[in-house]
Amino acid sequence: MLAWEFLMPVKIIYGAGSVEKLESVIDSLGLKKGILVSDKFLVDSGMAQKIVEYSNGKLVEVFSDIVPNPTVDSVDECAKIIREKNLEFAVALGGGSSLDCAKAACAIAKSNDSIRDYHTGGKVLSKSTAIPLIAVPTTAGTGSEVTKVAVLSDPSKNMKAPMGSPVLYAKIALVDSKLTLSVPKSVTASTGLDVLSHALGAFWNKHHQPICDAFALASTRLVFQNVEKVYNEPNNLEARDNMMLASLLAGLAFGTPGTTAPHACSFPLTNDYHLPHGEACAFTLDYFLRLNADVEGGRLHKLAQDCGFKDAFAMADELLRLKKAMGMKTTLREAGVKEEDIENLANHSTHPNIKNNPVDMDHAALLKMYKALY
Ligand code: NAD
């Protein structure tokens, strides 16, 4: 018999157009003076300004010094502004990069600490230093709006790593699929397969549990039904909405058991070879789907059948086809990795979440995989 726990304290407000209700959402928390945390592109595109208008004067600052794979320095800079201006809350608008930067900055806002103290310094986040966050995702990818994770990069250590704490949960996730209509094709593909890597990783995770399995199945089905459609028809709001829901469900799915081997392997592919996060996760995803296919009495084959495939291998074939159809890299050679770098890549694919994979991945198994993917 399984024993398990499930906690998800984020209130979810879901619906196309729901971001227009921002002022009443802020009012529901009794807040008056906050900061919008977004990235430069969304500021330049005018989306951030719209959000400021929807807040009706309650967002009094904008911080947008955020790059993909947000850095600890951006987090510290954002927290500094919150402290100096004595702000009560934040709204995060953007993909996972903006959301994660805001989550981390909010968590340390009422302290004088640097996020480095927690990211790599071993200090434990405390509720007493946190201010509330409303998370507004603009990509259908990370599910960060409902997870207790912030993934940060520390350029001084050439490392990208997640940090996890209940203190990092947003208070409210305001999820509006209309915001994803402007996402460019390559980001649509990469984020769409990030969703799948969360859903599949949650399902095959050694620590999987029934509530998260249900979210993972629903999410996996939605991705296979919609990701190529949304790639080819960017203005299809129904397909965009289905992917937004898939992303949210996948966030709920992996939030408890965590991510697994494809994520561990994604970190060096992003750090050293600059593959976007979702593409880096998807890079090994079909390999792991085949490798993990027969675990625990074939429950992955059952998942695949519930999604309309003959078995997990057929699902992996379709995933590889999708990656090629959406212009993603499928060999290390295409990703710019030299054959002599494979050893190094395997050495860096060792984040502890690799231990969540149901098939053990030691150094030899990583080398075998990367040679096959060369
Ligand atoms: P991102 O936030 O890095 O954004 C990618 C690009 O898309 C940026 O240039 C951004 O400006 C642009 N963009 C975002 N929304 C747009 C829109 N509506 N229209 C046009 N352009 C838009 O990408 P992401 O994939 O959402 O986030 C990736 C980050 O999230 C990585 O650092 C990853 O490690 C992290 N992540 C976090 C979690 C979590 O639970 N916290 C989970 C998975 C991934």
Image (cartoon, rainbow, N blue to C red):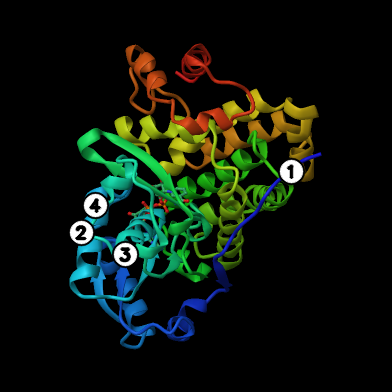
Where is residue 84 drawn, in percent x and y? 18, 71
Tell me which numbered mark, 3 or 1, is placed earlier along the sequence. 1
Residue that carries the numbered disc 2 in the rendered image: 77
* 270 lies above or below 210: above
Residue that carries the numbered disc 1 in the rendered image: 3
At label 3, the amino acid type is Ser
Residue that carries the numbered disc 3 in the rendered image: 38
Where is residue 101 drawn, in percent x and y? 33, 56
Q: Secondary structure at mark 3?
A: loop
Tell me which numbered mark, 4 or 1, is placed earlier along the sequence. 1
Tell me which numbered mark, 4 or 3, is placed earlier along the sequence. 3
Nearest-to-viewer mark from 2 and 3 = 2
Which residue lies most toward the left here? 84
Where is residue 93, by image quadrant? Answer: bottom left
Between the residue at mark 4 and the residue at mark 1, the CA separation in whole angstroms equals: 37 Å
Do the residues under discs 3 and 1 have CB atoms within 8 angstroms? no
